[in-house]
Amino acid sequence: MLRHAVRSGLRASFHRLGHFVANHPVFFASAPVLLSVLLGASFSRYRVEEEVERLLAPKHSLAKIEGNLVDSLFPVNRSKHTLYSDLQTPGRYGRVIVSSRRGSVLEPHHVDLVLKLHSAITHIQVPMLGFNYTFAHLCLLDDSKNCIIDDILRVLEEMRAARASNQTVPPLRYPITRLKDGREAYIGHQLGGVQTAGREGVRSAHALQLTYYLQVASALNEVVAARWELLFGHELERFSTAHPELVLYPFTSSSLQRDFQKTSHVSERPLLFSLAACLSVAVLCSSMRDCVRTKPWLGILALVTVSLATLTSAGIFNLTGGKYNSTYLGIPFIMLVVLLVIKMHFDPGSRRRSVYLPSEFAQKQKDRDSHSEVNHCFHLCSSSSVVRRGKIETWDVVDSVEEELEQGFSGNMKQVTPRKK
């Protein structure tokens, strides 16, 4: 009784609402579009997160904890900028790991190639505003106003100079070695795959790491440094092709961001294909002969409505400062397809059976009631399954409902047949 009263009240209220909407078609057709456009205009405030640490590293990661600790203890010299334990070092830089296919990178031939690579990198020219910028113009300076370069390069230059003058090559210690000028240098993060020979120092090394820091004191320096990073990668590709005995692994400050953005471009084709499939299914289902006959534009209208709803929700998220994950953009389209598939399950049955029934209108009303009672529960269950687990696990509901309808229709046919005779 209560259910019947609630249903009658809802039917009457929706009937009045339908009359009100029909009497004001211009307002109800233009208001949702205008609202969606106004809320969608908030995309002008949309900002892409560019800090790779926020995208890829949790807040409690060791790299972030160490970086915050260094920032708090050393606010002047900013030694965090040269910490290799950090996930993404701030600023602009180019880094390359050099490995040998055979032998050690400390062999004379490989040492000459590494120094040749260093010379090629420092002579990279970036044309900008009629001036050719090189590493000498962009490098990060030390207290003596000299470019900061890795100490392992000074070690290699001393080794080559000693061989050229037929002198004894000074022993190379690891991880702290002594340079020719008497200064001690830490090379633990610049030399890899090290095999030591006791007091004789390093016997061989499989790889070494070179880093070139750039200064970004102004907007012009930022643009030039970004261009230098691109040319840095091209130069390493050419050098690797010309000298295949060395293996080069380049990395720049924008490598992680560029790789992260490439992952979003991979989903463009599947997303466009899914949108086209949704549009085709919507038009096909609305073109079939059912209660809404020959109205293919109804499917397109449904798709446009879902798109406007998505745009509106995204605008609300932006205006309220919420986090909007683009992964959920496809959920409205999934719900639309699920609803259309369910409609295809029920409508053909009513069309086939209504011919043999004594009262076509009464039977259609019965099918409509069954559809309204079952379909909404099924659709809500399917949508919740898609959102929570990413898959639909309630397809057996359709089969059970169809079996019940089949039994009901077969019973009606048995009752109708004697009357026809």
Image (cartoon, helix red, strand yellow):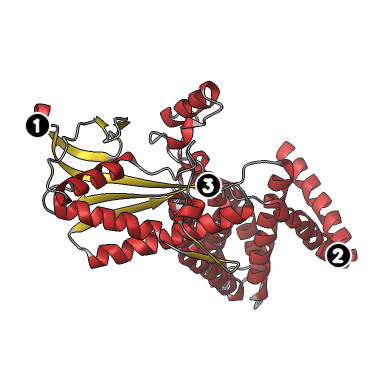
Identify which residue, 117 or 67, lies in the foreground: 117
* Residue ID for mark 2: 22
Quadrant of the rendering where the N terminus is positioned: top right
Mark 3 Cα-neighbour bin, 10 Å: few <14, some 14–19, many ≥20: some
Q: CA distance from mark 1 to mark 3?
A: 39 Å
Check if mark 2's residue and mark 1's residue have beta carbons within 8 Å.
Answer: no
Q: Amino acid at mark 1?
A: Ala
Mark 2 Cα-neighbour bin, 10 Å: few <14, some 14–19, many ≥20: few
Q: Residue at x 66, y 41 (%)?
A: 322
Q: Earlier in the sequence, mark 1 or mark 3?
A: 1
On the image, the x and y values in percent for residue 58 come to 47, 33
Q: Residue at x 83, y 60 (%)?
A: 31
In front of the other: label 3 or label 2?
3
Q: Which mark is residue 197?
A: 1
Q: Residue at x 57, y 47 (%)?
A: 49
Q: Earlier in the sequence, mark 3 or mark 2?
A: 2
Check if mark 3's residue and mark 2's residue have beta carbons within 8 Å.
Answer: no
Identify which residue, 54 or 63, lies in the foreground: 63
On the image, the x and y values in percent for residue 230 come to 45, 61
Q: CA distance from mark 3 to mark 2?
A: 66 Å
Q: CA distance from mark 2 to mark 1?
A: 91 Å
Q: Amino acid at mark 2?
A: Ala
* Residue ID for mark 3: 215
Q: Amino acid at mark 3?
A: Gln
| SS type, badge 1 | loop
